[in-house]
Image (tube, rainbow, N blue to C red):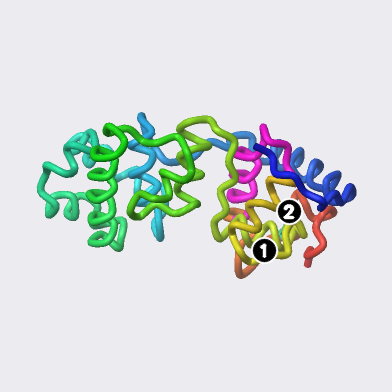
Amino acid sequence: MKPKTNQSNQKTRQRTALILKRLEQSIPDADTALAYETPFQLLIATILSAQCTDVRVNQVTPKLFKTFPGPKDFIQGDPELVIELIRSTGFFNNKAKNIIAASRQLIELHDGKVPENLEDLVSLPGVGRKTANVVLGTAFGRPSVVVDTHVRRVSNRLGLSKSSDPEKIEHDLMCLLPEKKWTSGAHRLLLHGRYTCKARKPMCDQCVLADLCPSVA
Ligand code: SF4
């Protein structure tokens, strides 16, 4: 539900609407690049994507999901095999531990299903607000704003949020974006940050938002 706000800065709202429109033209496809068939698979793929590229995760998950199709398979299977299959995504010991513990919690508390609310999702081991919002927005189609390092940087540079706190940025974007565009809008900001508004060298001379950006160099 859209939060109530007194941050009714009309100019920022109008500028945000223009930013969204431009990004919709420059990035027509705002779907996740992670390959998945079920909410559970997206949950696991998103856990694996921490500190790893989507391309690498997609190389790993076909064999992983074939070997371990659901949460029951992860808790009954060999943890060493899980580690082996996800090794190339980095931080494999922690990721394997979290995937198995999250699978156990899904079986014990949620009938083996991925819950469709933020509170239950963030209570799963290895699942933070960002991962939970990915699952809610992408797998369940519930409007949600994912704030990662790219969204944080781009939101700050574009003057959509002054905060460095992801939760506050999430709230600021929820106030500025129409609810039906929370998921796609935040994902477009993410992709814009990944490919154009890069951390070290933002490509302002090629940026479609240059005339709308207070940080243009
Ligand atoms: S103009 Fe530069 S700083 Fe602003 S959004 Fe574009 S790339 Fe980023």
Q: Position of residue 31 (x, y in %)?
A: 53, 36
**Residue that badge 2 annotates:** 207
Q: Secondary structure at mark 1?
A: loop
Please tell me which residue is depicted at 45% across the width and 33% down the height of the picture: 139
Q: Nearer the viewer, residue 203 or 146?
A: 146
**Residue that badge 1 annotates:** 202
The quadrant of the rendering that contains the N terminus is top right
* Residue segment shown in magenta: 177-193
Please tell me which residue is depicted at 68% across the width and 45% down the height of the picture: 174
Q: Secondary structure at mark 2?
A: loop
Please tell me which residue is depicted at 40% across the width and 36% down the height of the picture: 115
Which of disc 1 and disc 2 is earlier in sequence? 1
Tell me the chief SS of the magenta region: helix
Q: Quadrant of ligand 1?
A: bottom right
Q: Position of residue 22 (x, y in %)?
A: 76, 41
Q: Position of residue 195 (x, y in %)?
A: 59, 53
